[in-house]
Amino acid sequence: MAGDPLARIGSRKLEAYATSFPIGCFMDDTCPTISVMMPCCNNARYIEAAVESVLSQQIDVPLELLIIDDASSDDSVDRIKAIGDSRIRLIPNQNNCGISRVRNQLLEAANGRFLTSLDGDDLYVDPRKLAREWELLHTCPDPERTIVYSDVRWIDANGQTMLQSSAIAPPMEGLLYQAILDRRVMIPRDFMLSAELARSVGGFDVELPIYEDWDYKLRLAQKAVFRYTGSVGIGYRRHGSGLSAAAAPLHQKCQAMIRKKHGGEGSDGDPMRLLSLAGRLHGILTRNRLRDRKTA
């Protein structure tokens, strides 16, 4: 059955996951309604804040925080274990698999009927982020084919606000495939959707070292309607590693791969609009760097 965690994981992989499941999770009345999927790799500096922002969510449905640590060389795993909350389910990879494979592992192992996500260096900035998305999702005619998302606050390594995504590109609702492809819309992240929908588009492309989430969202956008909560829910951290630190040629290569894959080789939105947005973003980031130097 589709809702049976045993059937979903598959007998060959069950043994690998068995020790990570909380006692009783296979009972229907104790399985989580929502799974928060968290990839982690060398996020020791930020992981406790990320985990706490999930566990402190004010929502009245069963919740699991599924964390897959991708062979961290720091003490991320020890920090997660020390938190000691029964809602946490930790799966440590013995070897580094890369972000796309980890996201696919999370999709496969999550028990919740509905899914959302949070990277191990980010955090939820609204204690009702999940509740707002859950409530809006269930006002929709077809929750199983709807994606609900919130605004994103960009923060620096110290948690200081840099800007909000809605200041760069507007949030939109409805069918957003072309707008996401052209990047004419605030690109949703860490949104809530049904597990059935999340798994229906084939997972994340393991050939993409970055922008794997953009490609995945495009495939979702071909099947789903987007709804926007109107509130800020996520703190997206910009620091010296991860996507924001990747070399420019890699950014360009992966963006070109995705546009070609989706039939938009020459489409990247209005060039003048994107140039203006890039200038605005550069100015904001420069001011923040100068501020940080003065306060250091």
Image (tube, helix red, strand yellow):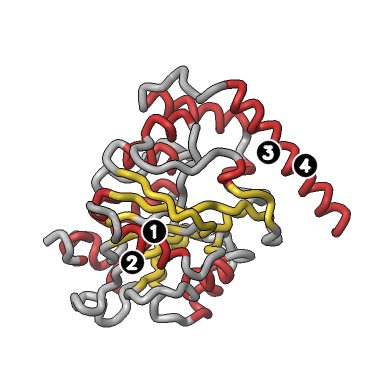
Closer to the camera in the image, 288 or 25: 288
C-alpha distance separating marks 1 and 3: 27 Å
Labels 4 & 3 near each other (Cβ < 8 A)? no
| Among the two numbered marks 4 and 2 on one chain, the one whose residue lies closer to the N terminus | 2
* Spot occupied by residue 23 in the image (x, y as percentages of width and height): 28, 82
Amino acid type of the residue tagged 1 in the rendering = Thr
> Identity of the amino acid at label 4?
Thr
What is the x, y in percent for residue 293?
85, 52
Q: Earlier in the sequence, mark 4 or mark 3?
A: 3
Disc 1 target residue: 116
Q: CA distance from mark 4 to mark 3?
A: 8 Å
Task: State the residue position of label 2.
Answer: 34
- As helix, strand or loop, the secondary structure at mark 4 comes to helix
Q: Name the image quarter holding residue 37.
A: bottom left
Q: Position of residue 276 (x, y in %)?
A: 66, 28
Quarter holding the C terminus? bottom right
Question: Is residue 184 visible from the viewing direction of this image?
Answer: yes
Mark 1 falls on what kind of element? Answer: strand
